[in-house]
């Protein structure tokens, strides 16, 4: 008997909503994703002298999910921790603030490192509220201190990175570093990153769409010290890509059927949809 | 034509993919499939599901 569908004005029943959430969280382990996972993981283990890695690709291709999974996998790997030491975090993931501010970025890094003194450091900063904006001081006057580069947060960040033995920091949405910026600002940003990389020895993984690649043109040194991983879409003219895409689609359709109907998909249903795979 | 005012024209469009997922293939589906349909991207042959790579969940 056909299932009665829920009117659009009504929320889904709990059980169906849960199935939908499961589907939304599902990511298929398809060929391109696995290749990029291998590449990125190897570069994090052995950067080969590079200080920066640019992970570029079109929007929606899976860069953020790749970073999330690699970070999670590295952090949850069983590690031996000497008594008194904190658990190492070999990789951390930080979304680049938009608009970018150094202060917000430092704070996000400290939160990603689960540093207990983050709020203490932030509050101690004269005239600064938690969101990094200027605030009135205790006597009701606005602070005149320049807050741009938040140098007082740099030392805690460097210390925390060393303590947690961080190998790589992944900047998701790294294009925000250069959004609507003048060349001089970009150079300044590059100098800041280079300096941070020199003092910490950490690999910076900058992930974003193709405009990110102009970061390499900031200076010859930026080009020399960075490498890249390209995460492209599958291409229709490449038979191997078509096959991998079909595999990914098939896996998703099976999950979609589970989400919608709560049962395994029938072969006839899958065939009907798979025959139209280029439309997906 | 007696279109009820509360129903939009959009609601009356057919959604074969969503319908197939929600209700399964209907009895009249084979008749529809027998209609010659121009395949997208230049007439590809049907996909052999046995040859499609099988992928699990990425984690």
Image (cartoon, rainbow, N blue to C red):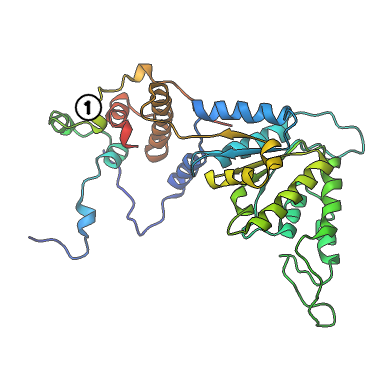
Q: Locate residue A107: give its quadrant.
A: bottom right
Q: Nearer the viewer, residue B34 or A34?
A: A34
Which residue occupies 86% across, 41% down?
Answer: A163
Q: Is residue A205 above or below residue A121?
A: above
Q: How many marks?
A: 1
Which residue occupies 35% across, 37% down?
Answer: A280
Figure quadrant of the C terminus of chain B: top right
Q: Is residue A155 above or below residue A22?
A: below
Q: Is residue B3 above or below residue A158?
A: below
In the image: residue A65, left or right of residue A12: right
Which residue occupies 63% across, 42% down?
Answer: A216
What's the chain of the residue with tag 1?
A: B
Q: Locate residue A234: give its quadrant.
A: top left
SS for dot 1: helix
Q: Is residue A128 above or below residue A23?
A: below
Image coordinates for residue B7, horizontal then vertical, percent: 21, 60
- The residue labelled by disc 1 is B43
Q: Nearer the viewer, residue A5 or A176?
A: A176
Image coordinates for residue A20, horizontal then vertical, percent: 45, 44
In the image: residue A74, left or right of residue A34: right
């Amino acid at each position: 008997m056909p299932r009665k569908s829920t009117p659009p004005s009504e929320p889904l029943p709990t059980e169906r909503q849960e199935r939908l959430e499961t589907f939304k969280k599902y990511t298929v382990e398809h060929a391109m994703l696995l290749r990029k996972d291998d590449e990125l993981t190897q570069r994090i283990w052995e950067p080969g002298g590079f200080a920066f890695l640019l992970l570029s690709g079109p929007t929606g291709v899976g860069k953020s999910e790749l970073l999330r999974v690699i970070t999670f996998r590295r952090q949850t790997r069983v590690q031996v921790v000497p008594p008194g030491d904190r658990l190492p975090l070999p990789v951390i993931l930080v979304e680049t603030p938009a608009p970018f501010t150094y202060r917000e970025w430092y704070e996000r890094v400290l939160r990603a490192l689960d540093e207990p003194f983050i709020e203490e450091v932030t509050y101690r900063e004269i005239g600064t509220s938690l969101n990094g904006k200027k605030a009135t001081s205790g006597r009701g006057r606005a602070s005149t201190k320049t807050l741009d580069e938040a140098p007082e947060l740099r030392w805690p960040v460097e210390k925390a990175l060393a303590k947690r033995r961080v190998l790589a920091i992944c900047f998701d949405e790294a294009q925000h570093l250069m959004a609507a910026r003048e060349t001089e600002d970009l150079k300044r940003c590059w100098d800041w990153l280079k300096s941070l990389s020199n003092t910490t020895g950490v690999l910076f993984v900058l992930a974003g769409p193709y405009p990110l690649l102009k970061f390499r043109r900031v200076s010859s040194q930026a080009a020399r010290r960075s490498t890249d991983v390209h995460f492209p879409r599958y291409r229709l003219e490449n038979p191997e890509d078509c096959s991998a895409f079909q595999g990914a689609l098939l896996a998703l359709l099976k999950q979609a059927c589970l989400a919608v109907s709560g049962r395994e998909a029938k072969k006839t249903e899958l065939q009907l949809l798979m025959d139209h795979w280029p439309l997906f | 034509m007696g279109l009820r005012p509360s129903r939009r024209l959009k609601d009356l469009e057919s959604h074969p993919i969503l319908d197939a997922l929600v209700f399964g293939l209907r009895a009249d589906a084979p008749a529809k499939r027998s209609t010659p349909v121009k395949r997208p991207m230049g007439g590809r042959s049907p996909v052999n599901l046995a040859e499609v790579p099988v992928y699990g969940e990425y984690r």
